[in-house]
Image (tube, helix red, strand yellow):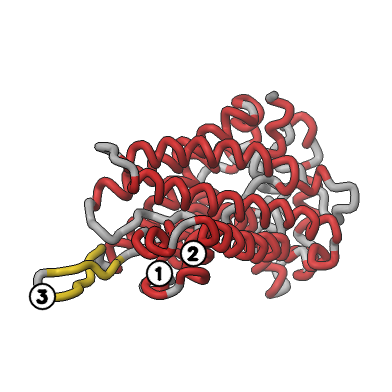
C-alpha cells in the first residue's frame, strides 16, 4: 500500500499518458538524484510554462476534472445530508455524531477520487497544491471550477430529495454564519460575528493543511504511512475541526467552519437567501490560510520538503514574470 502513496492528494500527471508536465512529488529521494539539475532547468522556464497554460488544452486534465466534479457532487450531497439528519435526529450530541460520519465519508470519497485526479475535491487543496508547486495554477483553476459545478449539482440533488420545510429549516445543510430566528418581538438575526467566523475559517483551514495535507505533500510520510492511513488522517482531522468549530462557539445559526468553499458555494447558489450573507468569509478565510501554509513551507529547512524541483512553485512564477532567474 505504501507504494500507492505517491499519488496521495498530489499531481495525477504521472498517471496520465498524455500529461505534458510530469511531476512526481512524492517519489523517494534515491529516485531523484538529479533534482538539483532539474531545479536549475526550472529556473529558465517561461511564465506560460510555470503557470501550466498547456493544461487548459490537455484532454487528460479535463478528463481528470470530471472526477473532481463528481467527487464534489457526492461530497456535498453526503455531507449536507449528514448535517440535516444528525440535527434532525433525537441525539444528545449531534455535533459528535456528525463529525464522525463526516470523517468516514471524506475518507471513502478520497480513496475513490485519488486514482482519478489526485483526490482534491476541495478548492483549498487545489489552491494550496498550486502555491506549493505540486500542480500548475492552470490545473488548479480547472479543478476548482469543476468542484464548484459539482457542488451545485450535489446541492440540487439534495434539494430534489428533501422536503421544502427541511431545506428551509436547515438551510439545505449549507454554510451559514447567521440565520433569521423567531424572537419575542418578531424575527431576529442570530449567529456569529463576521470577525469571529473569519478567524475560525483561517485557523481551522490552516490546521487542516498543517496537520493532515502536509502528510500527503511530504513524500517521505506519504510513503511510510501508506494511502489508506494518510487519507484516514485527513478525514479524521476534518471531522475533529468540524466538531471543534461547531462546539466552541455554541452559537445557533453558525454552521461551523466550512473549510471547503465549493461546498458552501453550491448550497448558496441553490438555496440562496441568507446563505450569501458573509459568504465571502468561506473564500477569503481559506485563501489566507493557504497563503500562510505556503509561507510555512518556504520557511522550514528545505531538506524537510523536497520542493526544489517543482516548476510550478509560486515564487518561481513571480520571478519568471519579472524575468528574474536564480
* Helix, strand or loop under label 3: loop
Query: Which dot marks residue 267?
Result: 2
Question: Where in the figure is residue 72, as x and y percent of width and height?
Answer: 61, 54
- Determine whether label 3 and label 1 are within 8 Å by CB: no
> Relative to 173, is 150 on the left or the right?
right
Task: Residue at 61%, 41% (x, y): give it.
Answer: 109
- Quarter-of-image position of residue 262: bottom right
* Helix, strand or loop under label 2: helix
Viewer-side residue, 70 vs 11: 70
Question: Where in the figure is residue 317, as x and y percent of width and height?
Answer: 68, 65
Q: CA distance from mark 2 to mark 3?
A: 30 Å
Viewer-side residue, 192 vs 227: 192
Question: Where in the figure is residue 87, as x and y percent of width and height?
Answer: 33, 47
The N terminus is located in which quarter?
top right
Task: Residue at 76%, 42% (x, y): give it.
Answer: 24
Q: Dot 2, how many residues are within 10 Å of its Cα: few (below 14), some (14-19), or many (20+)?
A: many
Viewer-side residue, 278 vs 8: 278
* Helix, strand or loop under label 1: helix
Task: Residue at 84%, 47% (x, y): give it.
Answer: 16
- Quarter-of-image position of residue 7: top right
Query: Which dot marks residue 275?
Result: 1
Badge 2 or badge 3: first in the primary sequence: 3
Q: CA distance from mark 3 to mark 1?
A: 24 Å
- Determine whether label 1 and label 2 are within 8 Å by CB: yes
Q: Dot 1, how many residues are within 10 Å of its Cα: few (below 14), some (14-19), or many (20+)?
A: many
Query: Which dot marks residue 185?
Result: 3
Badge 3 or badge 1: first in the primary sequence: 3
The C terminus is located in which quarter?
bottom right
Question: Where in the figure is residue 74, as x and y percent of width and height?
Answer: 60, 50
Where 319 falls versus 88 (above or below)? below
Badge 1 or badge 2: first in the primary sequence: 2
Q: Disc 3 or disc 1, which is closer to the eye?
A: 3
Amino acid at each position: 500500500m505504501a507504494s500507492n502513496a505517491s499519488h496521495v492528494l498530489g499531481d495525477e500527471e504521472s498517471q496520465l499518458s498524455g500529461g505534458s508536465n510530469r511531476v512526481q512529488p512524492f517519489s523517494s529521494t534515491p529516485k531523484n538524484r538529479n533534482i538539483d539539475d532539474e531545479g536549475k532547468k526550472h529556473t529558465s522556464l517561461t511564465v506560460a510554462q510555470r503557470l501550466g497554460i498547456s493544461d487548459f488544452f490537455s484532454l487528460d486534465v479535463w478528463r481528470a476534472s470530471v472526477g473532481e466534479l463528481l467527487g464534489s457532487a457526492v461530497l456535498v450531497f453526503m455531507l449536507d445530508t449528514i448535517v440535516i439528519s444528525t440535527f434532525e435526529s433525537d441525539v444528545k450530541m449531534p455535533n459528535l455524531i456528525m463529525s464522525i460520519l463526516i470523517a468516514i465519508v471524506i475518507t471513502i470519497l478520497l480513496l475513490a477520487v485519488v486514482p482519478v485526479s489526485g483526490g482534491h475535491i476541495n478548492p483549498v487543496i487545489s489552491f494550496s497544491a498550486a502555491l506549493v508547486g505540486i500542480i500548475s495554477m492552470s490545473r488548479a483553476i480547472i479543478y476548482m471550477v469543476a468542484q464548484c459545478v459539482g457542488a451545485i449539482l450535489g446541492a440540487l440533488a439534495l434539494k430534489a430529495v428533501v422536503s421544502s420545510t427541511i431545506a428551509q429549516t436547515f438551510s439545505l445543510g449549507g454554510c451559514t454564519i447567521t440565520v433569521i430566528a423567531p424572537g419575542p418581538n418578531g424575527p431576529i438575526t442570530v449567529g456569529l460575528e463576521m470577525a469571529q467566523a473569519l478567524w475560525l475559517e483561517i485557523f481551522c483551514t490552516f490546521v487542516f493543511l498543517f496537520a493532515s495535507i502536509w502528510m500527503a505533500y511530504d513524500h517521505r510520510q506519504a510513503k511510510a504511512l501508506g494511502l489508506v492511513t494518510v487519507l484516514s488522517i485527513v478525514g479524521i482531522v476534518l471531522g475533529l475541526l468540524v466538531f471543534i468549530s461547531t462546539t466552541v462557539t455554541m452559537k445557533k445559526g453558525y454552521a461551523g467552519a466550512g473549510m471547503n468553499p465549493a461546498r458552501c458555494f453550491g448550497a448558496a447558489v441553490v438555496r440562496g437567501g441568507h446563505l450569501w450573507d458573509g459568504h465571502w468569509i468561506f473564500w477569503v478565510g481559506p485563501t489566507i490560510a493557504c497563503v500562510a501554509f505556503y509561507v510555512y513551507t518556504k520557511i522550514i529547512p528545505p531538506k524537510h520538503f523536497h520542493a526544489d524541483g517543482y516548476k510550478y512553485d509560486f515564487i518561481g512564477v513571480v520571478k519568471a514574470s519579472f524575468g528574474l532567474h536564480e
